[in-house]
Image (spheres, rainbow, N blue to C red):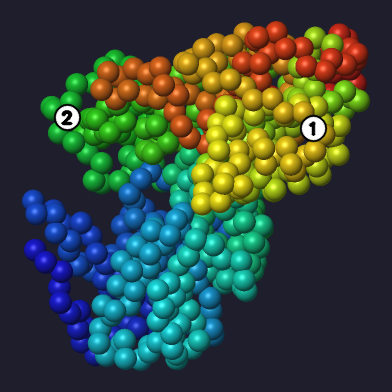
């Protein structure tokens, strides 16, 4: 079945009777593209009618909203239609925007949701809403000056309505972009406007996680919301009518049924046999049996969505010991001994740096920094801004690689460029290990000597905690190969320290001070911080 060639006209009397009713417009006026159910997989044009979850969201919208959800519940479509409707029928030049996680997603949302819905309005109605500007990312309406735009970032001007789509993924994969959204885009929404931040979960860190946890805490406390507070909207998988499967086709274990029974009691719901079958089949086929990934994409509870399993994590035991022994402290005093750095060099993605001092027998990590898409000059300026007495810069093996170009005089390695930028600073290249697991083992061996500043190393500690093996979907086991994601950069930088320290490097040793030798330092500074 093919796409309809032209919109179906609504008769003039029906339009006249209902056009001032937003609820009617949202259920009768707009058309969307949806995946067809026929075997050919052709798309279909259908009338948009909000489903149960979407209607619930519309009824509970607040000035600031955070949506934690299962996958494929249609909220981006809903909000695109809502923003279009708002812009069309506004009596003032209202600005509506959608921020997508990348350029491809932004183009698809604008083309297939916003512009498609506008172009498939009844002909007589669309004639009343002419366009002053029709660009690749924005519709500006001539009759009222209102607009709707889809982009990857929005900093300039006021946005009266703003939707941030898949913000959890933006925080996990594009931390600099997430920071720009938090500092630039969100403040552009006035308190009498409306902000909707929506995503599936992506681990227990980042701005989306912080927003969701604050909103959940307010909800659990029963506190009245102010216009600055976020309202929590949680939409679990078991509320979606499509998430069912023939129960006879799936074998559930006793552990599976115990899990569902616990969720029923906790969330005061009934999970049918067909729903249980769908969940188990989806978990095992789409996620290789990985319970944590299933919980992120199809959560049963708000907290489950953000859980990060310690299964398959390389340094889970070492970090557990570190916390139990009080070696993660609120802050670490700066000593006069030199500050060493350990690097992982990103090529087009993340560069990570750990800052380290050796004091007595303790390896103290006083700061962690990471950023993506920046040049070497950026990182040199960042290091210099701290005012440290710099010791040795430990670089990974690929820092020695020459950059080939047409001019032989500019074929220089990263190490050579850094040495020019930081004259007088000592550099060492850490040799490449033949097996990465050997480097991880070396790092585990020296972990017991490490102390961490919880304030300035918070993100780095999270990177170490979440650094894990790949899940082998074929065998249903963890592989021996690390997963390459946002966490691997910080962990690889820390591994440079582990490989050097395990070889007996003592660094620039300073005199022992009251950190590990005497518990009074911790009593005076506060209890160890769990990060």
Q: Disc 2 vs disc 1: which is toward the camera?
A: 1
Q: Nearer the viewer, residue 214 or 118?
A: 118
**Is residue 461 shown above or below 416?**
above
Residue pictured at 33% horizontal, 69% vertical: 111
Residue 261 in view here: no
Disc 2: CA contacts within 10 A as few (<14), some (14-19) or many (>=20) = some
Position of 121 compared to 511: left or right? left
Measured as percent of width and height from the top left, residue 417 is found at: 67, 41
Residue pictured at 34% horizontal, 41% vertical: 237
Give the quarter of the image for residue 294: top left
Position of 191 compared to 103: left or right? right
**Which residue is the site of mark 1?**
425
Q: Tag 1's secondary structure?
A: loop
Residue pictured at 69% horizontal, 48% vertical: 378
Measured as percent of width and height from the top left, residue 423 is found at: 80, 38
Q: Nearer the viewer, residue 100 or 17?
A: 100
């Amino acid at each position: 079945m093919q796409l309809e060639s032209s919109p179906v006209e609504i008769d003039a009397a029906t339009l006249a009777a209902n056009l001032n009713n937003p609820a009617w417009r949202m259920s009768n006026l707009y058309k969307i593209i949806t995946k067809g159910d026929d075997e050919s997989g052709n798309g279909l044009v259908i009338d948009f009618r909000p489903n149960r979850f979407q209607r619930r969201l519309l009824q509970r919208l607040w000035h600031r909203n955070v949506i934690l959800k299962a996958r494929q519940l249609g909220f981006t479509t809903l909000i695109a239609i809502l923003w279009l409707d708002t812009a069309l029928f506004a009596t003032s030049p209202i600005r509506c925007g959608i921020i997508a996680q990348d350029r491809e997603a932004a183009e698809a949302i604008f083309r297939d949701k916003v512009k498609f819905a506008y172009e498939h309005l009844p002909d007589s109605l669309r004639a009343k809403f002419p366009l002053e500007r029709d660009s690749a990312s924005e519709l500006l309406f001539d009759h009222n000056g209102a607009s709707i735009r889809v982009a990857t970032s929005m900093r300039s001007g006021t946005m009266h309505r703003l939707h941030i789509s898949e913000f959890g993924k933006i925080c996990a994969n594009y931390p600099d972009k997430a920071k720009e959204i938090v500092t630039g885009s969100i403040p552009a929404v006035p308190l009498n406007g409306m902000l909707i931040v929506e995503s599936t979960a992506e681990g227990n860190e980042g701005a989306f996680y912080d927003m969701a946890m604050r909103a959940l805490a307010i909800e659990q406390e029963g506190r009245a919301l102010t216009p600055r507070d976020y309202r929590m909207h949680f939409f679990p998988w078991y509320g979606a009518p499509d998430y069912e499967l023939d129960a006879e086709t799936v074998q559930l274990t006793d552990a599976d049924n115990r899990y569902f029974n616990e969720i029923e009691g906790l969330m005061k719901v009934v999970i049918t046999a067909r729903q249980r079958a769908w969940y188990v089949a989806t978990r095992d086929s789409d996620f290789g049996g990985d319970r944590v990934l299933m919980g992120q994409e199809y959560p049963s509870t708000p907290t489950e969505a953000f859980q990060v399993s310690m299964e398959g994590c390389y340094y889970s035991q070492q970090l557990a010991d570190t916390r139990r022994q009080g070696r993660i402290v609120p802050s670490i005093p700066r000593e006069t001994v030199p500050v060493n750095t350990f690097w992982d060099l990103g090529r087009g993605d993340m560069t990570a740096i750990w800052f380290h001092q050796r004091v007595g027998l303790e390896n103290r990590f006083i700061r962690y920094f990471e950023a993506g898409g920046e040049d070497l000059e950026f990182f040199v300026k960042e290091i210099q801004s701290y005012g440290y007495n710099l010791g040795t810069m430990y670089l990974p093996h690929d820092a020695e690689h020459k950059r080939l170009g047409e001019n032989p005089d500019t074929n220089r390695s990263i190490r050579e460029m850094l040495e020019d930028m930081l004259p007088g600073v000592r550099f060492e290249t850490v040799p490449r290990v033949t097996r990465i697991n050997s480097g991880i083992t070396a790092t585990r061996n020296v972990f017991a000597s490490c102390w961490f500043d919880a304030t300035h190393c918070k993100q780095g500690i999270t990177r170490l905690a979440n650094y894990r093996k790949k899940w082998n979907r074929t065998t249903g086991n963890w592989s021996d190969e690390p997963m390459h994601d946002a966490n691997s950069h910080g962990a690889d930088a820390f591994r440079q320290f582990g490989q050097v320290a395990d070889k007996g490097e003592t660094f620039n040793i300073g005199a022992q001070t009251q950190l590990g030798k005497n518990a009074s330092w911790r009593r005076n500074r506060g209890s160890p911080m769990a990060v």
